[in-house]
Structures are given as C-alpha cells and as structure tokens.
Amino acid sequence: MNQFFESVESKQSTGLVGELVVPGDKSISHRAVMLASLAEGKSEISGLLEGEDCLATVEVFKKLGVSISKENEKYIVEGKGLQGLEN
C-alpha cells in the first residue's frame, strides 16, 4: 500500500456528469465524437476540429444511426449506448 493511504474505499457510481473543456485537436475531436456516440443520451461538443478526417468520423457514426447535428458552433450528439449502433 502507498505510504500516504492506509486504506482505499470504492463506491458504486450512478454515472458521470460534467463539462470538460480542451482545445480543438484532431485526436481529441475523433475521440469526442466516438465517446459521445457510444454514450447514452445527449452530448454537446464545442471546438471540434472540422478537418476532413474528423468530419468523416461524424459521417461514419451518422451511418451507424447516431443523430449528430451542428447548432451554433456546437455538435449535438444523441448517443445510442454501447449496444445501440446499427449495421
């Protein structure tokens, strides 16, 4: 055990809620679209790098049944969950 901790306790979580702000970046943009698509419910992505390959990732997830739209410089993703993607 680490010298700073005598014990570690873990509790079950009901979910993750919050806001994360990072600069626009190609790899972060791809990951943001992927994670938002696989999450359940609505996610907003601002600062998405709108390069050809990042927009191709958006199109791939749209073809898999994920609703993705752009409103006021933000991408709105209606995530389908881990089992919700279509063929």
Image (tube, rainbow, N blue to C red):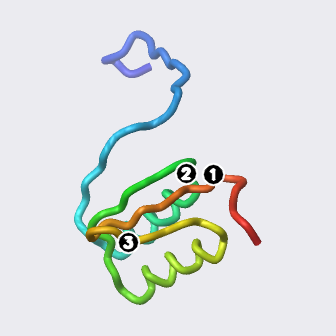
Q: Dot 3: few (<14), some (14–19), or many (≥20) neighbours within 10 Å?
A: few
Nearer the N terminus, badge 1 or badge 3?
3
Q: Dot 2: few (<14), some (14–19), or many (≥20) neighbours within 10 Å?
A: some
Residue 62 horizontal/vertical position (percent): 58, 74
Contact (CB < 8 A) between labels 1 and 2?
Answer: yes
Work out whether residue 51 or residue 75 is closer to the camera in this orientation and state it. 75
- Position of 14 relative to 54 (above/below): above
Contact (CB < 8 A) between labels 3 and 2?
Answer: no
Q: Amino acid at mark 2?
A: Ala
Residue underneath mark 3: 70
Residue 46 horizontal/vertical position (percent): 29, 64
Residue underneath mark 2: 39
Residue 84 horizontal/vertical position (percent): 70, 56
Residue underneath mark 1: 81
Relative placement, left or right, of 64 versus 77 is right
- Position of 55 relative to 45 (above/below): below
